[in-house]
Amino acid sequence: MDKMVRRMEVHDVEDVAALSAELGYPTTPELVRERLARITTNGNAICYVATACGSVAGWTHAYAVFLIESPPYAELGGLVVSSGFKRQGIGSALVQAAEDRARWDGLPRRYRRSSQIAS
């Protein structure tokens, strides 16, 4: 299987919305487009999609957290893998891309906020 992780782009919003609904967070492509625009202009966040067999198989959103009381860290805000692509390394590839980016940005710690899995 050919899989690739890349930055999420505007043309991915329909697939991202469908995957979000699969996880139990129904949304619309229009709302995903608005949210993606806000997230990507922030500069402290990144969104990735994983593609496999020519389609979007999953996505993740990671962002930097800056607090007064502790050192900065990266947190996964969302991670979704399509039920048709489970157990094929898609989730691991997305997490690895987010962690690589966090290290590149100098964020030594990384947290995953949720372990909810779409079925």
Image: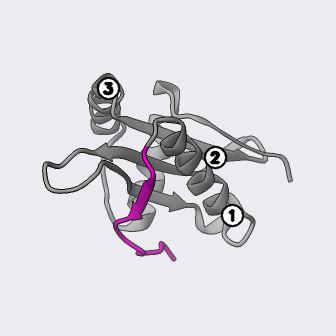
Mark sitting earlier along the chain (2/1): 2
- Helix, strand or loop status at disc 3: helix
* 19 relative to 40 in the view: left or right: right
The span from disc 2 to disc 1 (Cα, nearest Å) is 10 Å
Is the residue marked by circle 3 packed among few (<14), some (14-19), or many (20+) residues within 10 Å?
Answer: few
- SS state under label 2: strand
- The residue where tag 1 is placed is 85
Q: Amino acid at mark 3?
A: Ala
* CA distance for labels 3 and 2: 19 Å
For badge 1, the amino acid type reads Phe
Q: Residue at x 49, y 60 (%)?
A: 80
User: Residue 50 magenta-drawn?
Assistant: no
Dot 1: within a 10 Å radius of its alpha carbon, few (fewer than 14), some, or many (20 or more) residues?
some
Residue annotated with mark 2: 50
Label 3 vs 1, first from the N-terminus: 3
Q: State the residue at coordinates (46%, 45%).
A: 16
| Real-space Cα separation, disc 3 to disc 1, in angstroms | 27 Å
**Farthest-out residue, right:** 1
Q: Which secondary structure dominates the residues rendered in magenta?
A: loop
Residue 92 at x, y percent in the picture: 64, 62
Label 2–label 1 contact, CB within 8 A? yes
Do the residues bearing badges 3 and 1 touch, measured as CB atoms within 8 Å?
Answer: no
Image spot of residue 26 (x, y percent): 31, 57
Relative to 77, 119 lies left or right: right
- Residue 37 circle label: 3
Q: Is residue 83 left or right of residue 117?
A: right
Q: Which residues are magenta?
A: 107-119
